[in-house]
Image: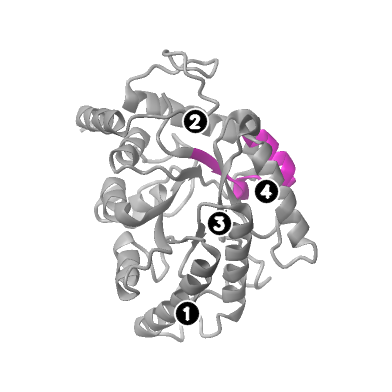
């Protein structure tokens, strides 16, 4: 039995592989989705032949999973694409956000061409010369403009709270949605590792608070003490509880592994991460995983299967009660 959401892997964890090779590895491992980070080294949205690259990427995604196609989300966490000297700058809360706005507009265009589930983005760290009021005013204005662009292209935006940024928690993201009257084009990304560091209600509290707007999920392990993405088993995340909560709130989008500093060991970590996820899901659903890639009911775990939400929800409740 498969999860009701799509398990994916982020291309920012394959920085030493050409994009087409990274996709082939992820397809071989059995992922259902890909989180594509726009920027070095895979797909520069400003390159002269970027349109050709996007066309090739769409075709490649369509060939995955035996021709049924892999889902995609567009991630925008590239580090030095816009400013070679300052990581992630400029951001939406900087005085001049022209480059960031153009980058995010291109991300929307590319997401539309890929038929991606969403474009995930962050607010940015408040600059020293700005007050919190300045930052929120800039964010409201600029995200409002991006919502209009996304609406014109039929694309959903997904705001990710990040430790140390102006929008740091799910409550911060909900504040912005409220300020903008919760447009349907704007949702929330939750990185489960971040929840250990900054969310008062932990992972479960954050996911439940974000549930009505949850558009994208990033999966990783992390110590509870600081922001450091780690492979599963090397931090404090309760992976079965994460997956149980996602199932219980009815999430059906992409949940992609986010290991942006582990490209040196990408193929092994892609395999190990999926194995860890399937073991955790087996614990939630009560189905024993099989090393050959099928569960004990004989269902092929390499392709999505229709699953009863009511059954999953009941399994999730049972699992969490057992874990508590």
Q: Which mark is residue 75?
A: 3
Q: Which mark is first along the chain, 3 or 2?
A: 3
Q: Residues within 10 Å of mark 4 (few under 14, many from 20)?
A: many
- Mark 2 → mark 3, Cα distance in angstroms: 23 Å
- Mark 3 → mark 1, Cα distance in angstroms: 23 Å
Is 238 on the left-hand or right-hand side of 47? Answer: left
Q: Disc 3 or disc 1, which is closer to the eye?
A: 3
Q: Secondary structure at mark 3?
A: strand
Q: Disc 3 or disc 4, which is closer to the eye?
A: 4
Q: Residues within 10 Å of mark 2 (few under 14, many from 20)?
A: some
- Mark 2 → mark 4, Cα distance in angstroms: 20 Å
Residue identifier under label 2 = 304
Q: Are marks 1 and 4 in contact (CB under 8 Å)?
A: no
The residue under the point 64% across, 59% down is 38
Residue identifier under label 1 = 127
The picture places residue 171, in percent across and down from the top left corner, at 29, 63
Q: Which mark is residue 58?
A: 4
- Mark 2 → mark 1, Cα distance in angstroms: 44 Å
| Residue nearest the observer in this picture, 94 or 72 | 72
Residue 16 appears anywhere in the view: no
Q: Which mark is first along the chain, 4 or 1?
A: 4
Q: Are marks 2 and 3 in contact (CB under 8 Å)?
A: no
| Region of the chain picked out in magenta, as a range | 7-26
Residue 89 appears anywhere in the view: yes
Figure quadrant of residue 312: top left
The picture places residue 302, in percent across and down from the top left corner, at 55, 26
Queried whether the magenta region covers residue 138, the answer comes back as no
In the displayed structure, 162 sits above or below 71; it is below
- Mark 1 → mark 4, Cα distance in angstroms: 37 Å
The residue under the point 52% across, 47% down is 258
Is 97 on the left-hand or right-hand side of 244? Answer: right
Q: Disc 2 or disc 1, which is closer to the eye?
A: 2
């Amino acid at each position: 039995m498969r999860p009701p959401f799509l398990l994916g892997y982020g291309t920012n964890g394959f920085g030493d592989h050409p994009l087409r090779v990274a996709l082939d590895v992820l397809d071989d491992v059995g992922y259902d989705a890909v989180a594509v980070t726009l920027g070095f080294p895979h797909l520069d949205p400003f390159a002269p032949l970027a349109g050709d690259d996007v066309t090739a990427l769409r075709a490649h995604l369509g060939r995955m999973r035996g021709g049924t196609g892999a889902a995609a989300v567009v991630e925008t966490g590239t580090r030095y694409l816009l400013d070679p000297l300052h990581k992630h700058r400029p951001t939406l809360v900087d005085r001049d956000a022209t480059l960031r706005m153009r980058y995010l507009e291109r991300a929307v265009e590319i997401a539309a061409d890929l038929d991606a589930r969403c474009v995930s983005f962050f607010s940015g760290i408040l600059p020293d010369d700005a007050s919190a009021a300045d930052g929120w005013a800039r964010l409201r204005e600029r995200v409002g403009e991006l919502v209009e662009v996304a609406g014109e292209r039929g694309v959903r935006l997904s705001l990710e709270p990040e430790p140390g940024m102006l929008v740091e928690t799910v409550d911060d993201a909900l504040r912005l949605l409220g300020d903008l009257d919760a447009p349907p084009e704007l949702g929330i990304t939750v990185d489960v590792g971040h929840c250990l560091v900054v969310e008062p209600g932990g992972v479960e509290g954050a996911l439940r608070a974000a549930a009505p707007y949850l558009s994208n999920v990033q999966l990783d392990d992390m110590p509870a003490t600081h922001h450091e993405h780690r492979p599963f088993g090397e931090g404090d995340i309760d992976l079965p509880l994460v997956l149980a909560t996602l199932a219980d709130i009815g999430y059906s989008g992409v949940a992609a592994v986010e290991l942006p500093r582990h490209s040196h060991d990408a193929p092994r970590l892609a395999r190990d991460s999926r194995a860890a996820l399937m073991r955790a899901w087996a614990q939630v659903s009560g189905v024993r995983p099989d090393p050959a890639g099928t569960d004990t009911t004989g269902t092929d775990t390499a392709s999505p299967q229709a699953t009863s939400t009511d059954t999953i929800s009941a399994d999730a409740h049972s699992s969490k009660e057992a874990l508590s």
